[in-house]
Amino acid sequence: MKVLENIAYYAQTHPKRSALQFDDFKCNYKQLKERIELAMEDTINIPSHHFVGLVMKNPMETIIYYFALLKRGCIPCVLDFRWSQAQIDSLLEHYGISYIIRDFREVIYTAHYSNKMKWCEEDILHIGFTSGTTGLPKAYYRNERSWLCSYEENEKLMSEVIDIIVALGPLSHSLSLYACIYALYSGRTFIGQQQFNASLLLKKIEMNSQTVAMFTVPTMLLSCVAENIEISGLRYIFTTGDKLHSKLRLKVKRNLPQVILIEFFGTSEASFISYNYNNKAPYNSVGLPFPNVKIYLAHQDEQNVGILNIKSNMTFSGYVDTEVGNSEWIEIGDFASIDCDGYLYLHGRQCDRLIIGGRNVYPSEIETVIQQCDAFDEVCVVSEPHSKFGQIAVLLYTGEQEVSYQTLRTSLAPYLARYQIPSKLLRIDKMHYTESGKIARKQMQETNLEGGFSI
């Protein structure tokens, strides 16, 4: 593993350089190497070529045991400690994870076995898991080469020397783990938190007085901007997971004028697909595809909207149940189109598409237009069954003021077709979110149908 070689190199050449900081816990590169070696002794009874679950609240211990397992010839399976015990037990049994490591260095033999996970000669870093908003999270293989290729593309977007990489969120989230390993691979300092606290994190970043790149999702970025803390060393903000709305972009530009904002579109499995560099892309676009990403739109309709498929050297090595090589096309699950300038546009998830009176309607397209109205903070368009049209669109929104239906219809009429304009709207106290900070559309839909948002 190249990342292990690099950690050993930095431990020898820059032993006192800060490697990891989580809250009040710190270690330099020399200490990191030593703690990895100690953790290897704790795992001595785990045979090599085993898949080992990491279910730890302590992020420092998580990353140390992650590398210790790799050095022992095992593959770490990074589970979210916030999942219920029943969900964790189901994952262990379903995928046959025979060992787990919990907090306080507790190594547990589960006695589970399955032939679902197959040992690969490829450079597998870990087994990751999708968010699992419905059913059991899906396990997938993440190889080292794919992330090294992603790091190369990241570096091309940063013209200034960066000393510190920050990620907001637990290491069970692909973005945070990606950023942590990125920092250690490149000899930088990584700063994270066990539990997200925007104020404390920003103050810690400012105390370092070094140049910083931050990886985050829109909901956490909003919390950071709301703190109104001046961070002179922050140079780049990389955000992904959901599209930034115009109000948040303006807040970043106003509060952090020195920052270059880079918005990624991608998935845990595919890594990065496209990017919007400092708001240069059209507002409703997710930017330009990376130069090493090939795109194919399957089953295009008359508007040239098709199902997005991608191929690149940054993709995963397949799901545990259905392994694929990263030379194959991956269906992303979004309807998409590309304009004449090469910008990529998303029209909505396949599973989110509405069919109203026989016409395809994509909630994300409606949300993009509505989000530009000042009266709305966050918006989510869901469906309700209808006897005549099959489905209708319902707008759920947060905001300080109540908006009348007539106002909504008048403001949207110049930009949307009549069948795209929501037939109902409802102001709610707050949105439901996934563990990764996105609006949980399916949960929002279910709550609405059950009457949970009714006034």
Image (spheres, rainbow, N blue to C red):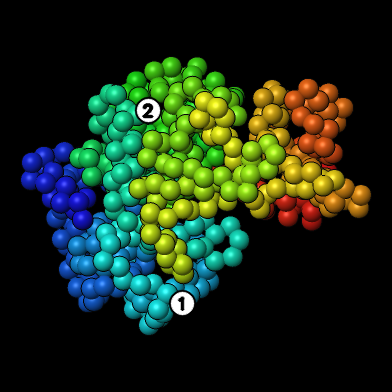
Task: Using the image, tell me which numbered label, if any, was put on residue 64.
Answer: none
* Residue of label 2: 236
Mark yes or no: residue 65 visible. Answer: no
Residue lying furthest right: 388
* Residue of label 1: 93
Of the two numbered discs 1 and 2 on the same chain, state the one appearing first in sequence.
1
Q: Are the residues flagged by discs 1 and 2 in contact, CB closer than 8 Å?
A: no
Residue appearing at x 44%, y 42% in the figure: 294
Which x, y percent locates residue 163?
25, 31
Where disc 1 sits, the SS reads helix
Cα distance in 3D space between marks 1 and 2: 41 Å
Above or below residue 250? Residue 344 is below
Task: Inspect the image, locate mark 2, and give the three-letter code of the amino acid beneath it.
Answer: Tyr
Which x, y percent locates residue 124?
30, 60
Above or below residue 433? Residue 323 is below
Residue appearing at x 54%, y 66% in the figure: 136
